[in-house]
Amino acid sequence: MRLAQPLVALALLATSPAEAAECPPAPDHAAALRALIAEARAAPNEAAGRGVSHRMWALWTDAPDAAAQELLDTGMERREVGDFIGAMKAFEALAAYCPHYAEGYNQRAFVHFLRGDYAAALPDLERAIEITPTHVAARTGLALTFIGLGREGEAALALRAALAMNPWLGERSLLPMLEAEERDL
């Protein structure tokens, strides 16, 4: 039963960052992500490439400790049921508790994106990428956010960077449209 998880997460939300324990460093998955990127590039088809993407997600969502994992899981659960306020509270607490963990920023950006607040999503995506440059999903989110902001040239650059790491992303179908708009500028 997962009832304890939201209760612990809510208790963490009520605790100020100064009162909370210090977040340990995020797990170092850099070598594993580099290997998965190489595997995605070599994947023979989309199904294989998507399988690699799922394994990347398992690394990105591996939080620094149990408290951070509970905040991440709670925020993702709240987002999945459309409770963007609850999700945002969890992700804000996660970013405050673990400021060096990319996924807290990526997930908070996703909620902003879903709410249509692209300008708010942008700095969180940039921070996630700064922390984890191989975060393919954050780079893809950056491309989609730039599209939402009407910045197609920057969207094309961000999408190319994501596709350089995983050429099988579903968003690859957007690149010809973005490149056409780049030529029209």
Image (tube, helix red, strand yellow):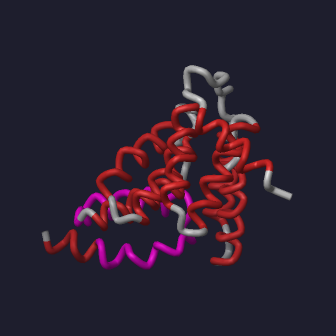
Q: Residue at x 59, y 35 (%)?
A: 14
In the image, the segment drawn in magenta is: 150-178
The answer to whether residue 141 of the structure is visible from this angle is yes
From the viewer's perspective, is 67 left or right of 82?
right
User: Would residue 174 be counted in the magenta stretch?
Assistant: yes
Q: Residue furthest right?
A: 1
In the displayed structure, does residue 143 sit left or right of residue 83? left
Q: Residue at 67% across / 69% down in the picture?
A: 43
Q: Position of residue 73 (x, y in %)?
A: 68, 52
Residue closer to the observer: 117 or 127: 117
Give x and y (percent) for residue 13. Answer: 59, 39
Q: Position of residue 109 (x, y in %)?
A: 44, 53
What secondary structure do most residues of the magenta stretch adopt? helix
**Does the segment drawn in magenta span residue 55?**
no
* Quadrant of the rendering where the N terminus is positioned: bottom right
Rendering quarter of residue 24: top right
Residue 159 visible at all: no
Query: At x 60% / y 30%, what residue is drawn?
Result: 15
Q: Residue at x 69, y 60 (%)?
A: 39
Residue 19's x, y, as percent? 60, 21
Q: What is the residue that sits farthest to the left in this orientation?
A: 185
117 and 82: which one is in front? 82
